[in-house]
Image: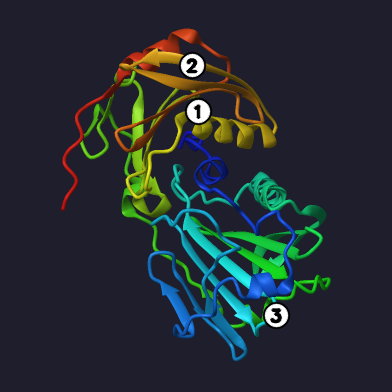
Amino acid sequence: MPKLTCSIGGTALWLALSCSSGPPAAPRTSRDFTTARAPVADPKSRTSSRLGYSWLLPDGWTFRPPEPFWNSLSLPALDVYAAQQSSEGPILLVIARDEVHIVPGKHPGDDPKDYDGLEQAGADTLREANAELVSTARLQMFDIDTVQVTGDSGNVRISIRLLYRGYRRFEFRCFDLKRNPGWQCASALSAFRIEDLPESGTEYDPPQVLHLRDARYGVAFDAPDDSWLSFGPHQGWGGTQTVWAWNHAGRQIDVQTLDLSALPTQPDQAIFAKRMGDAERASGANIAETQVAFAGHLWHHLEMSGGGHGKRDLFVLVAQGVMYGLLITQPNRDQRLIEAAKKGFRLIPKAPSPR
């Protein structure tokens, strides 16, 4: 099985789609936070068969709206829940999502570098919350390798734990208004369970010749020739993200679609590309950003090197309610391959959405 790379990293998409990761920057008191929205009289449990977890709150904890600790748009790919221990106790925000996967049997977290990425994601969250990084640690949670990142904004202490289980990522953000040291949200998770999920049988389908035509997302692609064999499609983010990959002689072309129809407005393409570039820079890549026209549209082009992924050229387009990505990965940049990949990409009419 050839080693394949993932199309656009989950962290990059996360930063591109999320608006805010923590409480607002303006100074606030304990009363401001605890009365922002009264606790709701929901049942004491949350479950997800899609993401394979269940959460039963112990006595003393109550589910509540996640604002103001979660100010991002609601997306079908994410589960976001918050709970609080009494009116002045800590608040726990739980975020669960699935990851796109390319290599059969290979999961996020199998590579130690994946945890460096989680640590960076936690640090980015603290920075967006205007919190100073205090410490980082590697530990076990639910008998799973976990990253912990802790920060302090001056009026709230934020401890973030992140882990992978299979193709899923779980994040636990503990906000302590009393700014006590240590992990203050342990009791809330005493009955949190993460189960194994079966893997899709198509994960192990043999590579094949594929001339892509997908009217759901209005995308078509032809590889440079039929010696390029395709793996996929592979899905993540609750089925809103789809990736097709073609591999040949240590080089790879990825075509990605991300359905943006759940968003109230179409994201700005330039901001989208900038945030993905910033995420790649944070992982150690060198980035040159330009714009280039092909397939009848003006794309943002991120020319990337370093970061342990060879030479990569990522083209990003937001159009007709979809984010399109075309990624070419190769040991040494061959402009002829880049031009062939661009020539092979086309937008086609989208099929009407089911009512």
Q: Position of residue 128 (x, y in %)?
A: 67, 48
Distance, label 2 to label 1, CA atoms, is 10 Å
Indicate which disc, 2 or 1, sits on the residue closer to the N terminus: 1
Q: Is residue 324 visible?
A: yes
Q: Quadrant of residue 248?
A: top left
Q: Residues within 10 Å of mark 2 (few under 14, many from 20)?
A: few
Q: Secondary structure at mark 2?
A: strand
Distance, label 3 to label 1, CA atoms, is 41 Å
**Which residue position is annotated with label 2?**
291
Q: Residue at x 60, y 23 (%)?
A: 304
Q: Toward the viewer: 198 or 192?
A: 192
Q: Position of residue 345 (x, y in %)?
A: 32, 21
Indicate which disc, 3 or 2, sits on the residue closer to the N terminus: 3
Left or right position of 200 against 3: left
- Amino acid of disc 2: Gln
- Amino acid of disc 3: Gly
Q: Position of residue 231 (x, y in %)?
A: 36, 37
Q: Secondary structure at mark 3?
A: loop
Q: Residues within 10 Å of mark 1 (few under 14, many from 20)?
A: some
Distance, label 3 to label 2, CA atoms, is 49 Å
Question: Would you say the residues marked 3 and 2 are in contact, meaning their CB atoms lie under 8 Å apart?
Answer: no
Q: Toward the viewer: 141 or 216?
A: 216
Left or right position of 146 against 220: right
Q: Is residue 142 visible?
A: no
| Image position of 74 with respect to 196: above or below | above
**Which residue position is annotated with label 3?**
89
Left or right position of 214 against 302: left
Q: Quadrant of residue 29?
A: bottom right
Q: Residue at x 78, y 64 (%)?
A: 155
Q: Residue furthest top?
A: 336
Q: Which mark is residue 270?
A: 1
- Amino acid of disc 1: Ala
